[in-house]
């Protein structure tokens, strides 16, 4: 068990409650500290634990709650800011919320989302304010917070605060997070399994330092100007179309969605320049080689750097994401503030040797690749892991590889892992939220569920599994008309747990939910 270093509660920086709250609730909230806000607020000031780089919309709270801000130090040179939102009508459950990107922002919309169900919600800045990794430069303690300690501290403290506030201990403790938050959830499962009874992790940033090297390799190979890529954006669009032409129907439904990208092995020779009848963009031999490289697992002297891009029929988005400003920023910030510790580092200094070093460096075990989850299983905790099949940011190959790694490490078959760890491939889901398919499983405030039934809502599903023993065979996602939840459901699809894959045996284009079957 990892020790928690130098934890000290420093101060409560504010609370909030509704004007409709009962006097007892208000007085208990005020007893924690001063400060008043009201239910349904939209203009509340979020001055703590955030800055201008945090661009979440201000949420509107749906229930009466006590808002508590806490700052605590984790060493002589690091501190964490966290908020616990404590609803008046508590369901006796705690829910820690993971962050995205390089952290640094309190996830206010998620706090509003989960408190609606009665969870006491907790979100922290993970040890630095703002989305930049600049805080890591020459500050190992700040990086330790980012790697694992901030989540540990916020969770431990929130358990204590909830007991103090409600006068009774929580019954179950949960975690939900995606991307960087997905990594945080697995980090807790691997290193601090005592923290949570149920964990929902999406698109986890495992071996993230490898992705942060895949990006500079892409930029050095393809260029940094989206309108002038070495393999042009028109060619990537042609690659996507050809992939869909060859692979969309393999699952039984022609719906622009490839259910099992691992079965998709497109042959791009039809796109070769000079091919008879080819009218659109064509691939030169150099293009063919560069494109193939992106889809291959990338190793340097035996060290796996990144598992590569998948043939998912979303190649255009992969190209634009890898070249886009957010990813260009990661390509610079990781070497500058973490692996090379050189704030003047520029992209033209990148070398494969640096890429290998960044992955092998594995600062404070940040790679989060321990495959032994026996302690989670032993204590009866459950993990729901999901990954969008058209994720252009963290490729779904990362999740496939980790699940297989756990299976090998624990010498457990998928049927045995099913007892406590289930991984679902969500077709038509991009990175954490959004996408062309039935991508809403209630995973966040930006992917609202079609209903509060556990079948439609992964948050309710993990509770059912932990507390009632009802394990999910599938996760049912919803696609809303025009992507707008207020316009109603266009169709639903039950997503299978890995390694099963979804095939369509129904009529038409795949919108018949009952037409889908999970097969080996
Ligand atoms: Ca299809």
Image (spheres, rainbow, N blue to C red):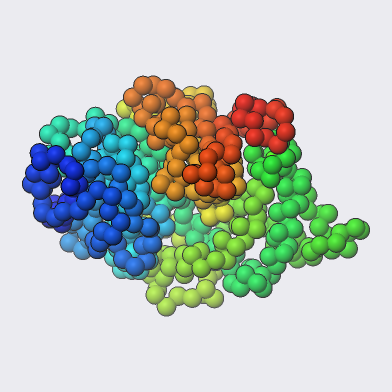
The residue lying at 72 percent from left, 42 percent from top is 248
- In the image, residue 203 above or below residue 383: below
Position of residue 159 measured from the top left corner of the image (x, y, whole percent): 20, 39
Q: Is residue 5 visible?
A: no
- Name the image quarter holding residue 95: top left
Furthest toward the right, the residue is 276
**Which residue lies at the image location 35% right of the left edge and 48% below the top edge?**
110
Q: Nearer the viewer, residue 137 or 513?
A: 513
Residue 236 position (above or below residue 154): below
Q: Residue at x 68, y 65 (%)?
A: 233
Location of the N terminus by quadrant is top left
Q: Nearer the viewer, residue 99 or 253?
A: 253
Query: Does 37 appear above or below 389?
Result: below
What quarter of the picture does the C terminus occupy? top right
Q: Residue at x 91, y 58 (%)?
A: 276
The single residue placed furthest to the top in the displayed view is 469
Residue 332 location in percent, x, y? 47, 69
Q: Left or right: 316 with respect to 358?
A: right
State the count of labels. 0
- Residue 292 in the figure: left or right of residue 343: right
Q: In x, y percent, where is residue 42?
A: 30, 56
Farthest residue in the bottom direction?
A: 344
Query: In this orientation, does residue 393 appear?
Result: yes
The reply, left or right, for residue 110 in relation to residue 355 is: left
Name the quarter showing ligand 1. Answer: top right
Q: How far across and down, in percent of the image, does residue 278 sit?
A: 86, 59
Give the side of residue 177 with respect to residue 81, left or right.
right
């Amino acid at each position: 068990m990892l020790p928690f270093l130098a934890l000290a509660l420093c101060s409560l920086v504010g609370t909030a409650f509704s004007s409709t709250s009962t006097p007892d609730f208000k007085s208990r909230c005020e007893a924690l500290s001063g400060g008043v806000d009201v239910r349904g607020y939209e203009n509340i000031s979020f001055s703590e634990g955030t800055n201008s780089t945090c661009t979440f919309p201000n949420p509107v709270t749906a229930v009466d709650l006590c808002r508590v801000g806490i700052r605590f130090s984790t060493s002589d040179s690091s501190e964490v800011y966290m908020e616990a939102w404590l609803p008046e009508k508590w369901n006796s459950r705690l829910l820690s919320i993971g962050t995205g990107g390089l952290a640094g922002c309190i996830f206010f919309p998620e706090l509003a989302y989960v408190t609606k169900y009665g969870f006491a919600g907790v979100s922290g800045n993970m040890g630095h304010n703002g989305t930049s990794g600049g805080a890591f430069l020459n500050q190992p303690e700040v990086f330790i917070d980012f790697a694992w300690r901030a989540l540990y501290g916020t969770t431990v403290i929130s358990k204590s605060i909830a007991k103090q506030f409600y006068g009774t201990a929580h019954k179950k403790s949960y975690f939900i997070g995606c991307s960087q938050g997905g990594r945080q959830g697995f980090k807790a499962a691997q290193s601090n399994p005592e923290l949570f009874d149920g964990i929902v992790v999406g698109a986890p940033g495992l071996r993230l330092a490898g992705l942060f090297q895949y990006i500079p390799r892409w930029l050095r190979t393809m260029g940094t100007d989206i309108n002038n890529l070495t393999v042009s954006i028109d060619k990537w669009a042609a690659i996507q179309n050809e992939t869909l032409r060859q692979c969309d129907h393999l699952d039984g439904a022609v719906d622009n969605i490839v259910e099992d990208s691992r079965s998709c092995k497109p042959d791009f020779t039809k796109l070769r320049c000079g091919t008879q009848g080819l009218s659109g963009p064509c691939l030169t031999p150099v293009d063919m080689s560069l494109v193939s490289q992106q889809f291959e697992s990338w190793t340097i002297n035996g060290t796996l750097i990144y598992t590569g891009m998948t043939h998912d029929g979303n190649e255009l988005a992969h190209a634009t994401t890898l070249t886009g400003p957010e990813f260009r920023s990661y390509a610079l910030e990781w070497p500058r503030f973490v692996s090379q510790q050189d704030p003047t580092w520029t992209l033209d200094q990148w070398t494969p040797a640096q890429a290998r070093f960044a992955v092998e460096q594995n600062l404070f075990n940040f790679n989060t690749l321990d495959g032994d989850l026996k302690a989670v299983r032993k204590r009866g905790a459950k993990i729901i892991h999901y990954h969008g099949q058209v994720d252009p940011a963290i490729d779904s190959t990362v999740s496939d590889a980790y699940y297989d790694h756990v299976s090998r490490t624990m010498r457990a078959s998928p049927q045995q892992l099913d007892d406590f760890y289930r991984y679902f491939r969500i077709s038509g889901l991009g990175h954490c939220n959004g996408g062309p398919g039935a991508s809403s499983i209630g995973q966040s405030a930006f992917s609202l569920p079609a209903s509060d039934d556990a079948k439609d809502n992964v948050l309710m599903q993990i509770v059912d599994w932990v507390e009632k023993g009802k394990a999910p065979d599938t996760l049912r996602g919803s696609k809303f008309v025009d992507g707008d939840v207020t316009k109603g459901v266009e169709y639903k699809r039950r997503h299978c747990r890995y390694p099963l894959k979804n095939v369509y045996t129904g009529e038409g284009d795949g919108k018949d939910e009952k037409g889908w079957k999970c097969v080996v």
